[in-house]
Amino acid sequence: MKTLILCDFDGTISVRDMTYVLVTRFASGDWESIDRDFREGKISSKEAYARIAKMLNGDQSGALRFIDEHSDIDPFFSSFYQYCREKGMDIKIVSDGLDFYIRRILEIHHLTEIPFYANATHFREEGGIDISFPCSEDECGLCGTCKKKIIQIHRGEYDSIFFIGNGFSDRCGAREADFTFAKQSLYTYCVEQDITCHFFKDFGDILNDLKKQIHGIIFDLDGTLIESYEAIFLALKECFQYFGKEIFPFHDLRKYLKADLEATLSQFFTPEEMNQGIPIMRKKYEEVYLDKTHFLEGAKEVLDALYSDGVALGIASNKFGRFSRGAIQHLGVLHYFKSVLGAGDVPKNKPFPDMIHSALKEMDLPPKEAIFVGDTLTDIEAGKQAGVDVYALPSGFYSKKELSREKPKRLLNNLQELTRIAKNPLSRPL
């Protein structure tokens, strides 16, 4: 399978947006308003470059000396590039920046064999530069280098095309590619546009993603695999009635449920009342939870498929451990799981990593070979602290946008995606 990875340069390979750095140093006049108009989508990058070029001072030698002083790249890019070469994956740079500084920075880091597409610069003898756009697309004209067009040009040569980027000029590339790695404003855009992507902070993350083999999946329980909100509400109601308090309406339950039972009850009761109320609530919950718990849509089928494929399965839930195991046993899938842990089974509940660490130990897996699937911000924090990639599912309390603020590795559209992801972590929904 032949793979091409197209990678943005400014702020992605280079640690800085080099065009912005250069303009800050060498431009005079109100270039900030031009830059602002471009970033707000009011003008194209071609128009922005044309305007700003008239404000640029200095000569080529001075600009190159300045580049030499600001030539840092992502510390993991070289090892990422070497791995791709070893695996036969082609790397090409697609940039809406300027060719002269890309060429110079690649020279400094001994990476000149990497092909790149960028806007062309010509330094005038009297000072200043002219900029042309050999990779633009007249149909759109928004960017000097049309990354969508470049992907389309290479379609016939490759089985898969991955895209890596961070900003405004990367949007069309992200939409056109088979899979996207995104950070900064591109990640936000991908979430808003339902473009499947992996969040990355550096090329070390992407390198790990390319190497990733999923041998185990740990699930949160409530809101991820099962729905037991009616049972939770009835148990809470019993606690409220014991203290002579009126409970909120059922439709407000999600607003008040927190990371664990103690955090939920602390909103309404004193510490002394909580000590009395927790056993009352658990007693009522035990009476009703089996009859009031069911699988979320598609969850049973996904578990069937994963178990049949030999994927090790675990559960890490802030539901009381005995109830977690009881629910899974009642639903007929307890034997699918190598580990089922809940509140009371480890020293600290999520968002602390104890539960996930214990699950991994029982599943006999290192963190890099597993993923954690959950539906809350608490789940994302717990997975990150445990060193496990988190795949967030917007099925419970939080929307995709809310979950994305905590930067999980991936946002799922539904549980069914996991059957394909387990076989190919970089697969895109059909």
Image (spheres, helix red, strand yellow):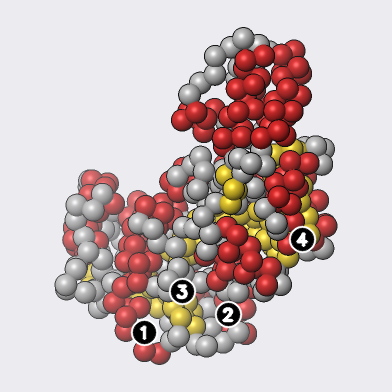
Query: How far separated are the C-alphas under marks 4 and 1?
Result: 45 Å
Q: Is residue 80 visible?
A: no
SS category of the residue bearing label 4: helix
Query: How far separated are the C-alphas under marks 3 and 1?
Result: 11 Å
10 Å crowding of disc 3: few (<14), some (14-19), many (20+): many
Mark toward the start of the polypeptide (2 vs 3): 2
The image shows residue 347 at horizontal and vertical percentages of 82, 38
- Residue type for callout 4: His
The image shows residue 169 at horizontal and vertical percentages of 32, 62
The image shows residue 183 at horizontal and vertical percentages of 47, 56
Question: Which residue is located at x 54 percent, y 27 percent?
Answer: 256
Q: Is residue 178 visible?
A: yes
10 Å crowding of disc 1: few (<14), some (14-19), many (20+): some
Q: Which residue is mark 4?
A: 335
Mark toward the start of the polypeptide (1 vs 2): 2
**Quarter of the rendering occupied by the C terminus:** bottom left
SS category of the residue bearing label 1: helix
| 204 to the left or right of 215 | left
Q: Which residue is mark 3?
A: 162
Query: How far separated are the C-alphas under marks 4 and 3?
Result: 38 Å
